Image: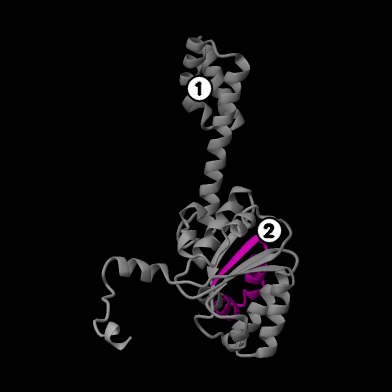
Amino acid sequence: MILQHERLKETFAEFGWSRIPEVFDAHAEEAAKLNIPYLEFLDKLLQEEIAYKQDRFVRMRTRMANFPYHRTLEAYDFSFQPSIDERRIRDLATLRFVENRENLIFLGPPGTGKTHLAVALAIEAIKHRYTVYFITAHDLVQMLQQAYVNQTIKQKMKALSKPSLLIIDEIGYRKMEEPAAHFFFQIVSERYESGSIILTSNKSYGSWGDIFGDSVLATAILDRLLHHSTTVNIKGESYRVKEKKKAGFFKPDPQAHEKE
């Protein structure tokens, strides 16, 4: 019996199984006690291993994706943002847009949950084994400028074209200088119909000429981004402002009632 147990351990190791060795004895005792059929016993063991490997895969890919934080769709308060159609977001979570190499743009004021939704959808993409990378527009510009100075720009551009889903967060908080704007155009062009992009921005499309400092360039960027895309406009109050109001940071103006 001991020899058989040792042989099983060696077999588990040979197959690269990590979870089954941890739960085998408990499941074996349960199967013997409850007279569980062999196939059911084997199925339970394999399902434990599959779930463990999937969880490990998701955690590893999530770390590699460079998210600023971990957010899920379940944690998003759709009731606070009635301008968003929850069914539409749930449909996006099926990831057909990633499969079809389409883009997704979230537009809205700061603090309305654009980044939250982008990260939540990206985590769903990781669960479905798509490759994902997250970066803010500010960090992207700095990274590309440094790569240009170091003469590694081609390698960086190639790396940014590889993920199934690239998230570029906070477009519009800072104006892009001419070289950075052209690099951005190249990224969008490289990924056109070959990989999905999620963008978040606090600026409407009509203001993108100001972001890139060139209305012609902005039009060319939008032409490629919007050809196969979905735009979600969020119109609502900032979550952060809401929480501060709850905490009493914003006091009502005693003269406001008199002015009405």
The mark nearer the N terminus, 2 or 1, is 1
Q: Is residue 220 left or right of residue 46?
A: right
Q: Is residue 208 above or below residue 17?
A: below
Counting from the top left corner in percent of width and height, residue 137 is at: 54, 75
State how far apart marks 2 and 1 are (Cα): 38 Å
Residue type beneath disc 2: Val
Residue at position x 50%, y 22% in the image: 24
Crowd around label 2: few <14 · some 14–19 · many ≥20 (10 Å): many
User: In this figure, which residue is indicated by the disc labeled 1?
Assistant: 24
Question: Residue 4 bears which disc, if any?
Answer: none
Residue at position x 58%, y 30% in the image: 47
Q: Is residue 226 left or right of residue 167?
A: right
* Local secondary structure at mark 1: helix
Question: Residue 98 bears which disc, if any?
Answer: 2
Q: Is residue 25 above or below residue 142?
A: above
Q: Is residue 13 above or below residue 100?
A: above
- Given residues 124 and 22, the one toward you in this image is 124
Residue at position x 56%, y 32% in the image: 49
Residue at position x 26%, y 69% in the image: 248
Q: Which range of residues does the magenta coloring cover?
A: 144-169
* Local secondary structure at mark 2: helix
Tag count: 2
Q: Is residue 56 found inside the magenta-colored segment of the image?
A: no
Crowd around label 1: few <14 · some 14–19 · many ≥20 (10 Å): some
Counting from the top left corner in percent of width and height, residue 147 is at: 58, 76
Which quadrant of the figure has residue 243? bottom left
Say whether marks 2 and 1 touch (CB < 8 Å).
no
- Given residues 10 and 37, the one toward you in this image is 37
Counting from the top left corner in percent of width and height, residue 144 is at: 58, 76
Residue type beneath disc 1: Phe
